[in-house]
Image (tube, grey):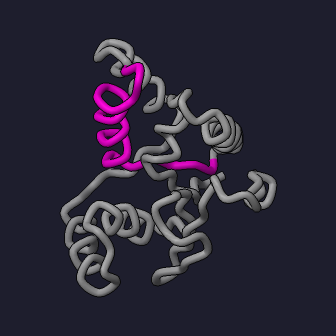
């Protein structure tokens, strides 16, 4: 099966964040389902942002060694989409035309240019569609992985 769901950084970070047990449980359930079905993708941007968050913002932080080991495991388990010059250019258009923050626009651009129709993120309004890319908040009370077929 082709990866048709792009996971934003916040979903990945919550899987490592024990300070919010409800969000952690939801993230772990959702990510597990995506890995099991092969339908999930990450971007190189997400992996970089994840590393920064788990080694600097989480409490307790992961050591650089543990985070590097986890990053290697993520690379083995997920399809990882590159951030290319075309993604950057498309993100600037998304920031300009859709008034997205640049890093959010880069997530959108990565999904759009890689023909990934769904992004899981709490950073966009749940259900919003931008040029064929739909955003779903996996932490919304109404969300279930089964609703996405995962």
Q: Which residue is found at the position 22% from the left and 65% from the top?
A: 88
Residue 20 position by quadrant: top right
**Nearer to us in this view, 115 or 28:** 28
Name the spot of residue 60 as percent of width and height, x first: 41, 19
Task: Answer whether residue 47 is magenta in the image.
Answer: yes
For residue 4, above or below residue 99: above
Residue 148 at what x, y percent from top left?
Answer: 73, 60
> Looking at the picture, does residue 4 appear above or below residue 61?
below
Q: Residue at x 51, y 49 (%)?
A: 41
- Looking at the image, residue 71 sits to the left or right of residue 52; the answer is right
Residue at left offset 34%, top offset 83%: 98
Question: Which segment is the magenta one?
Answer: 39-61
| Residue 37: percent from left, percent from top | 70, 44
27 magenta-colored: no
Considering every residue shown, the one lying at the far right of the view is 146
Q: Residue 11, relative to residue 110: is it above or below?
A: above
């Amino acid at each position: 099966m082709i990866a048709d769901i792009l996971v934003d950084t916040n979903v990945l970070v919550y899987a490592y964040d024990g300070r919010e047990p409800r969000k952690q449980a939801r993230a772990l359930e959702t990510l597990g389902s995506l890995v099991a079905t092969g339908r999930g993708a990450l971007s190189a941007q997400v992996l970089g942002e994840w590393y920064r968050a788990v080694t600097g913002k989480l409490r307790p932080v992961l050591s650089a060694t543990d985070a590097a080991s986890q990053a290697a495991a993520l690379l083995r388990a997920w399809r990882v989409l590159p951030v290319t010059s075309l993604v950057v250019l498309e993100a600037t258009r998304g920031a300009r035309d859709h008034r997205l923050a640049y890093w959010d626009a880069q997530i959108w651009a990565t999904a759009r240019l890689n023909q990934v129709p769904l992004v899981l993120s709490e950073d966009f309004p749940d259900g919003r569609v931008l040029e064929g890319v739909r955003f779903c908040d996996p932490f919304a009370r109404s969300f279930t992985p089964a609703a996405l077929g995962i």
